[in-house]
Amino acid sequence: MQQLPTLFVFTFGAAFFASLPPGLLNLNAAKTSVEKGKANGIIFGLGVALAVMLQTYVAVRIAKLISRNQHVIEVLLQLALGIFFVLAIVFFIKGSKQENKPLILTEAKKRNSFSKGVLLALINLLAIPYYSGLNTVFHSQGVMSYRIIDEVLFIIAAGGGTFLAMYLYVFYFNKWEHKTTSFSKNSNFILSGLMVLLFVITAFRLFN
């Protein structure tokens, strides 16, 4: 029981810092906040956090397999490779067709923002090997065992750290909502470029 606070802090921090650099999820959280309002951005972040918790649960379940069978991770990375390639094309085409017009915040159903957050987070398959590896390291260092309470805390901390990073993006861009026309216009190109970068990183991890 004494290692539980350490487990929570380390996992929360690992999730937060992994989600903090500009990426597909936090840029979409900012984009949602800019275009649909802060409330929708927060709902999007909650969707992302829920999906990350589901992925972390899967990661915990397969953590033991990682040390025995690398084929599982290879398959996940191959799937991620294809998804990032397709998303790069989709975002580029969407950005090319976007007109240069003033940004107008519109009301949107919060359920749609939540579903979008869940979907985008679920297709980010790199989260599973990331948290599987983290789980394995913590277990080898004695920070975590495979008790239910450890696993639940690990999952909650991963979701909490991710949501905090999403919220910071929502809050920051929402403060500048009247000066972010260029961000809204170019966000699809930014996301397309990010997909290319993730494609390269995933390919490097897969083939090396």
Image: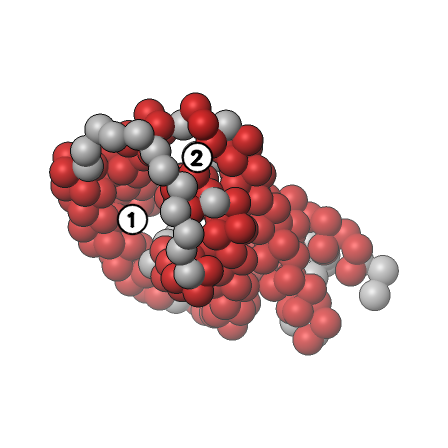
Would you place residue 43 above or below residue 57 in this image?
Answer: above
Name the amino acid type tagged 1. Leu
Query: Where is mark 1, residue-wise?
Result: 206
Taking the spot 43% from the left edge, 24% from the top edge, the residue there is 179
Name the amino acid type tagged 2. Pro
Give the number of the disc on residue 22: 2
Would you place residue 64 above or below residue 171 in this image?
Answer: below
User: Residue 1 location in percent, x, y?
Assistant: 83, 65
The quadrant holding residue 168 is top right
Give the number of the disc on residue 101: none
Residue 198 in sight from this viewpoint: yes
If you read the primary sequence from the N terminus, does the residue marked by circle 1 or circle 2 appear first?
A: 2
Residue 148 lies left or right of residue 168; in this view the side is right
Residue 111 lies left or right of residue 83; in this view the side is right
Camera-nearest residue between 177 and 106: 106
User: Residue 133 location in percent, x, y?
Assistant: 51, 54
